[in-house]
Image (spheres, coloured by chain):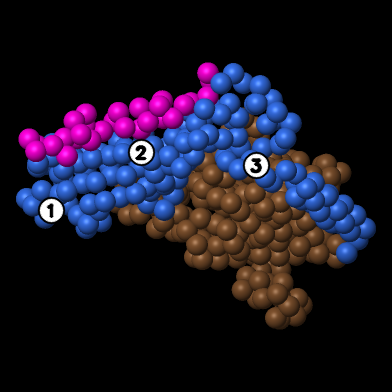
Amino acid sequence: MFLYSQFRFRSVWTGVSLIGSAAILISMSVYLDSTRTADFLLEKGPVREHPVWITAFYFHLVSAAVCLAVGPLLMVMRLIRVRRLHAVLGYLYLNSVLWIAAPTGLLISPTAKFGLLSAIGFVLTGLAWWATSWAGYAAIRRDDVPAHVRWMIRSYSIALSAVWFRVVHLVLSPQWWGWTEETNYVASVWISSLISLWVAERAVKKIYPTSSSWTEWLSVLGLVPRTSVSNLSWKEN
Amino acid sequence: MSKFLCVPCIVSLFVFAAVAMVRGSQDHTRTGEFASVSRQSTNRLAELPAAELMSVEEANAAILDGWPAGSRVAIFSRRLTTTNLSAEAHWYQANDSQSTDPATGLVGQLVVMAIPQPREIKEAEPQTRSSQLQQLPVYVDRTSRKILIHADGQWQPYQDWLAIELPKLKKLTGLEV
């Protein structure tokens, strides 16, 4: 996968991402079972009866599934070279993130388990997902391929925070470490987001480095002019 | 922003609003754990025979049978004044227990009373040490027969919780050395 192409043990990283994505997609079937209410929804209490919340939840579920399914196909070099296919898949991914998955994720974030800390983590991840996807779209609109690649790597990496969250949550299980489930959950939210950002920045640095990733992040927020971000040499192989 | 993004944006907004409005207009008088499923699927569930739904008696048995057999009674007897672990289940919707409506889940409370033995208190974890009386919400999904308990800030399968907590309580109360 393009995202991990310059990583050591890239097949392991790719395997974890693909298997994790597939596991999430399969586990989503529990929410489509009309004969029982999923534990996640039971935990939410009365808020799950709110029409806006439950609609946002199911929209998030379906659109995130699209992102996780389409994302890997956008990161395979051979498929990227088939421009038409890449454009169609990219269109699907981009619209899913920008108009459904990220906004609905932000809508349901405030009701995250264990309160404010995890809610803030989800909100920041959602905002970063939206911003990176939009920046990727804006870059390709102005034919700035290096910037497009960088931002879409970041966007897909953030999408994979769903996978990292489950992995970290499993690794930090209270059964093994003796802390509370709350500590585990909140830590998993933040650590998974940090892993996503770290993976993205490492990939960017290896594949399409810029003069400064910080400047590029600030440019998407409009805090510095985009012209201050310069591309360095491309290291694709 | 190009029309290629504008159109999906507007369509997504309209579809979201439409679905939310439809859900909002659905019957909200129903309570219980199946309220969030669609009316169509609820009607299908209502056709299930009553025998397939878990009764209060079955739920009681499933919840309390895991506890030391004599402890619920013995705590009140003169003979065993030092027996100090009891568990009771109280149901909030006992009147609905015979209902064949699968939307009626059983909601109740597990009341656990544990009197720690002095020699065990020192070894116990701080939160266990002080938990002499616990009232924990319990939910029984009558259709799937799944029992959930609300403990440690989250809903969790009752049997999982019991497997962890009961040995601790037994040790704390001197029932198991």
Labelled disc at residue B30 = 3
Q: Is residue B107 magenta?
A: no
Q: Residues within 10 Å of mark 1 (few under 14, many from 20)?
A: some
Q: Chain of mark 2?
A: B
Q: Chain of mark 3?
A: B
Mark 3 secondary-structure assignment:
loop
Q: Residue at x 53, y 24 (%)?
A: B53
Residue under label 2, please give it: B89
Q: Residue at x 57, y 41 (%)?
A: B32
Which x, y percent locates residue A127? 66, 64
Q: Residue at x 59, y 18 (%)?
A: B49
Residue under label 1, please give it: B121
Residue A50 visible, this orientation = yes
The C terminus of chain B sits in image quarter = top left
- Which is more N-terminal, label 3 or label 1? 3
Instruction: Identify the hue of chain A.
Output: brown
**Which chain is in blue here?**
B
The quadrant in which residue A218 appears is: bottom right
Q: Residues within 10 Å of mark 2 (few under 14, many from 20)?
A: many
Which x, y percent locates residue A222? 73, 78
Q: Are marks 1 and 2 in contact (CB under 8 Å)?
A: no
How far is the residue under mark 1 from the one under mark 3?
Answer: 46 Å
Q: Residues within 10 Å of mark 3 (few under 14, many from 20)?
A: few
Q: Residue at x 78, y 56 (%)?
A: A99
Disc 1 residue type (three-letter):
Ile
